Amino acid sequence: MLLVATTGCGAAGAPDTSPAPAATRPAPADAVSGSPSPSSPPADPRPRRSPRLDTWTVGARPLPLRPNGFGKVLPTPRKLRVRRLPTTDLLPPPAGGRFQGTVGPVTPGVRQRMGRTWSPSCPVGLADLRYLTLTFEGFDGRPHTGELVVNASVAHGVVGVFRKLYAARFPIEEMRLVTTADLDAPPTGDGNNTAAYVCRTTRGSSVPSAHAYGLAIDVNPFLNPYRNGDLVLPELASAYLDRSWRRPGMVLPGGVVTRAFASTGWTWGGDFTSLSDLMHFSANGR
């Protein structure tokens, strides 16, 4: 679980009372049925029609704080109960709609953008991290280019995972680096950034998190929240604790996301026994 300000990790917007949108994707969630082969090229253009998307300003309204520093857990705003927000492109989309995955070093420019999420005191040096760019399908049904920083030892396996998710048309809202701005932002409870590296300890301990080693990824955190007792993260995502109501972008047991990560030896936080961390996948079991 990454759980910085803009992922499960969430930022917030004002509650809305308009009706929740109807489902329009042909595969509404992390389907457990067979998916296309990762080697099969996606249809071009991929979308057959543009699905209806909502407007919501992520990070607009800070939450009241709990004594432990997290935001107050509030009911999910109606517009976010079936979340379909557009993707803001930070990088150019892939040419021709084909999956593209690249693995490269953490350049000085990438390092600068990471800000305080890495320092020389962290357990993994920059030389042992890799910067990935990955094609993903947004909730608009279109291809986008995301970015992750992960441990060099797992980089090519991660590319294979997201190749499978793209072939299966699993929707992802956002995939970008965690930055100092995220660390400094107040909790707003509505973020949904699929992210990997940030140097921090696990919650409530001094032990480095799997994210601090580049060995963990959180997928669609708002749609796959963390729960430990009365704490839900992101704090506005309680509507997604009901896993029987299957909505696009959810990670489900035996579904395409859990299968894709399992194929490269990663474990799922949905299988934890002491808490539920549905967004979280890790290469070291933590």
Image: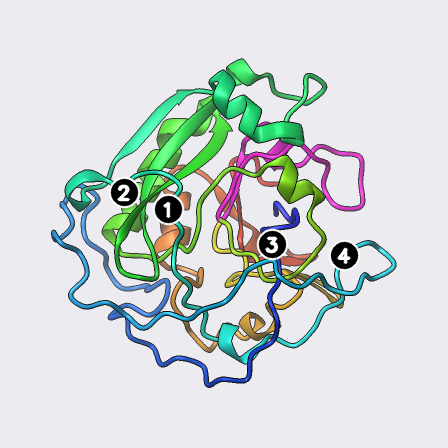
Span highlighted in magenta in the image? 194-218
Considering the whole magenta stretch, tell me its main secondary structure.
loop
**Residue bearing the label numbered 4:** 70
**Residue bearing the label numbered 2:** 93
Q: Kindly identify which numbered label has been placed on residue 200.
A: none
Q: Residue at x 54, y 70 (%)?
A: 240
Cα–Cα gap, marks 3 and 2: 25 Å
- Disc 3 secondary structure class: loop
Q: Kindly identify which numbered label has been placed on residue 8.
A: 3
- Disc 4 secondary structure class: loop
* Closer to the camera in the image, 163 or 254: 163
Of badges 3 and 1, nearer the viewer stands 1
Cα–Cα gap, marks 3 and 1: 21 Å
Q: Earlier in the sequence, mark 3 or mark 2?
A: 3
Q: Quadrant of residue 111?
A: top right
Q: Quadrant of residue 187?
A: bottom right
- Disc 2 secondary structure class: loop
